[in-house]
Image (tube, helix red, strand yellow):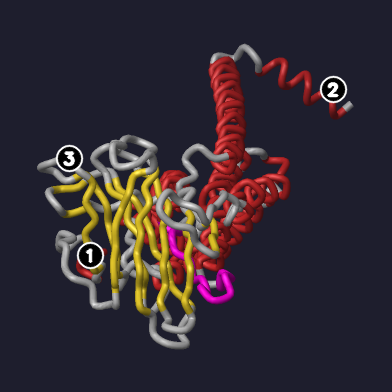
Amino acid sequence: MNHFLLGFLIFSSLPLHLVFSSHCTTVTNTKTFEKCMALPSQDASIAWTFHAHNATLDLVFFGTFISPSGWVGWGMNPTSAEMTGTRALIAFPDPNSGQLVLLPYIIDPTVKLQKDPLLSRPLDVHLLSSSATLYGGRMATVHNGATIQIYATLKLVPNKTKIHHVWNRGLYVQGYSPTIHPTTANDLSSTATIDVLSGIAAKGNNNNIYTLKIIHGVINAISWGLLLPIGAITARYFRHIQALGPAWFYAHAGIQLFAIFIGTVGFAIGIRLGELSPGRVFGLHRKLGFAIFCLGWLQTLALLFRPKTTNKFRKYWKSYHHFVGYACVVIGVVNVFQGFDVMGLGRSYAKLAYCLGLSTLIGVCIALEVNSWVIFCRKAKEEKLRREGFISGCSDKASGSSRG
C-alpha cells in the first residue's frame, strides 16, 4: 500500500514540476518587449514592457485555439487571481465574416455559474488600446492549434505593479457569446500573479489548492476506493473460517473504521476545496461524495445498535448492514473515477496505479469466491452422503482411530 501511495503522489503531482516550463519570447512581428514569462498552463506566455514613469503597461499574450470555432481570452483581475471579476479580452472568429475579432468582457459571478450568457461590454479599467493577431500574419486562419497574440496597453494604478493575469480558451462561441471552457485541472489553473516591475511571479494559492486536491484524491482513493472494499472482502470470505474465531470481525471492523475516519478527512478537504473555489461545481462528484460520507457514517453508527445473535431483529439488521456496506463500496469506487476525471487525470499514471490496485482486489475476490463455492459444494455433497448413510462409518472409524 505504501508503494501505491508513493506512486500515486509522484505521478499525480507531475504538473507541479512542469509549471512555467514552456518557452517565452519578447519579440513579435510588430513590437519588441523588455520581459517575458511562460505561464503555468495551456502552453501560454506573456511579454511586456512596463513604463514606470507613467505606470503604463504594454503587453502581449500568446495563446492557442483548441477548436476552429473556439475562443481564446486573456484578462486581468483587479482584486484576486481568479476568474470571477476578470476584465477580459476574448478573440474568436466573427460568426458572420469569419474574420478574427477581439471583444471586451467582464466575468461576473452569474456568468461563472452559467446563469447568464457572457455578453460583451466595455471594461472599467484604463485600457488604452487592444488588438489581436494570428501567428502567421493577417492571412492566417483559425484552426485547431493556431497561435494567437492578444495585445493590450493599460494604464495601471500608480505604485501597484502586481497584476493578476487570467486566461483560458474554449471550444465554441454562440453568436458573440463565448461558452464555458473545459474544466480539467490544466484549464482551472490558468491564473498567475506577476509583478510587472520586477518580472517575478508571486506565489499565490493555486499551488496550495492543487496540493490540497492531490491530498484529497490520494486519501479518498485509499479510503473509499481501496480500504473499504478490503474490509468488505474480509467480512465476506473470512467469517466462515472457524480457525480464525472472532479475529475476522475485529479485522473487518478495524479496517472499515480506519477507512471511514481517514475518508472523513478527505471529505473535509473536499469541502474546503469547494470554499476555496467558488463557482467551480462538480455536481456528480460532489453528490456522490456526500452520499458515500453519509452512508459510511450510517454504517459505522449502526454498530452501536447491533442486536445480539438471538434477537429476532438480527436478520433485518444484517440485511441493512449488507446493503449499505456494498452501496458504500460501489459508490466509493465510482466516485474515485469521477475524481480522476474532475482533476483531468483520466489518462494518467495515477489512474493506472489505482486501476491496478483495484484489479488486484477484484482478482482476489474472484479467487476467494470460487474457493467459497468449491467448499460449499463439497460440504453440500458430504452432507448429502451423510444423510444417506454413506460416510457415517468412515466418520466413526476416523473418530475411533483418533481416540485410539
Of helix, strand and loop, which one carries label 2? Answer: helix
* Residue appearing at x 56%, y 69% in the figure: 201
Q: Residue extending furthest top?
A: 390
In the picture provided, is 181 more to the left or to the right than 237? left
**Viewer-nearest of labels 2 and 3?**
3
Which range of residues does the magenta coloring cover?
188-202
The residue carrying mark 3 is 98
The residue carrying mark 2 is 401
Q: Is 296 in front, or is 388?
A: 296
Residue 103 visible, this orientation? yes
Q: Quadrant of residue 389?
A: top right
Look at label 1 and name its amino acid.
Tyr
Q: Position of residue 362 (x, y in %)?
A: 55, 32
Q: Residue extending furthest bottom?
A: 159
Of helix, strand and loop, which one carries label 1? Answer: strand
The residue carrying mark 1 is 105
**Viewer-nearest of labels 2 and 1?**
1
Look at label 3 and name its amino acid.
Gly
